[in-house]
């Protein structure tokens, strides 16, 4: 995957202008994360917007965040409680931090991987989750109706997949999966490790 450099100072304004429903996506992803998680892994921490919401929803949680940009993580460090967060520079294709985790969350990051990269990532996420652990994916998707494409994508760095494909990849990774929320070209998809 090509490296893309975001400007941490303008990131939230860019998301608000280019992703209709950005705030709602964040809210729905946090809601789908459940409650009571102790160890959370976030993939694509960015400026800490999702992490902030997750820590509020899971007041006893410790969050390990991963992002490809040190500049974005520096911004996240300035807004997140240091005693509850550990942030690392790394790409989605890299080995994931050691688990196990109760919860893995990614908002607006996984669509940068091609289909086979998403399927491979979902398998690695499943390996890090405890039984009953949950993966929450809030992201751009390829909608069934082309008129529902409202978020600009470049087709190169942005490679969204259908909800159906992602549900199938989650199932193939050993998770029970479902669509928690969807609106036009945005979706919150959940995968959960069955309890034996």
Image (spheres, helix red, strand yellow):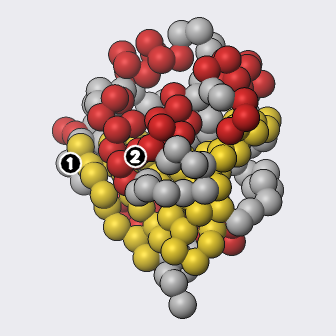
Instruction: Examine the rendering and report whether any part of residue 137 can be seen.
Output: yes
31 or 147, which is in the foreground? 31
Kindly identify the residue that appears in the image at 54 percent across and 57 percent down: 37
Q: Percent x, y for residue 174? A: 55, 80
Relative depth, front residue between 15 and 42: 42
Q: Residue furthest front?
A: 60
Identify which residue is drawn at 30% across, 34% down. Answer: 24
Label 2: which residue? 29
Q: Residue 141, image x and y in percent?
A: 38, 47
Mark 1 vs 2, N-terminal side:
2
Residue sitting farthest toward the top: 9
Tell me the element at label 2: helix
Quadrant of image for the C terminus: bottom right
How many residues crowd around disc 1 within 10 Å: few (fewer than 14), some, or many (20 or more)? few
Toward the bottom, the furthest residue is: 196
Residue at 50 percent of width and 47 percent of height? 58
Q: Nearer the viewer, residue 79 or 88?
A: 79
In front of the other: label 1 or label 2?
Answer: 2
Left or right position of 129 against 187: right
Q: Is residue 68 left or right of residue 7?
A: right
Q: Position of residue 155 (x, y in %)?
A: 49, 37
Residue displayed at 65% across by 62% down? 101
Residue that label 1 marks: 145
Which image quarter: residue 152?
top left
């Amino acid at each position: 995957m090509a490296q893309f450099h975001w400007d941490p100072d303008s990131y939230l304004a860019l998301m608000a202008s280019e992703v209709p429903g950005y705030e709602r996506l964040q809210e729905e992803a946090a809601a789908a994360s459940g409650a009571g998680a102790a160890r959370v892994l976030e993939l694509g921490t960015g400026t800490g917007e999702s992490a902030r919401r997750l820590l509020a929803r899971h007041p006893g949680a410790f969050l390990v965040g991963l992002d490809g940009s040190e500049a974005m993580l520096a911004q996240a460090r300035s807004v997140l409680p240091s005693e509850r967060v550990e942030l690392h520079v790394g790409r989605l294709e890299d080995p994931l931090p050691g688990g196990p985790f109760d919860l893995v969350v990614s908002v607006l990051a996984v669509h940068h991987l091609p289909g086979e990269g998403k399927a491979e990532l979902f398998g690695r996420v499943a390996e890090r989750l405890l039984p009953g652990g949950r993966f929450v994916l809030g992201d751009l998707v390829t909608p069934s109706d082309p008129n529902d494409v409202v978020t600009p994508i470049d087709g190169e760095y942005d490679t969204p997949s259908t909800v159906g494909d992602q549900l199938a990849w989650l199932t193939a990774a050993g998770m029970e999966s479902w669509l928690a929320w969807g609106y036009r070209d945005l979706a919150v998809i959940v995968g959960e490790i069955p309890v034996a």
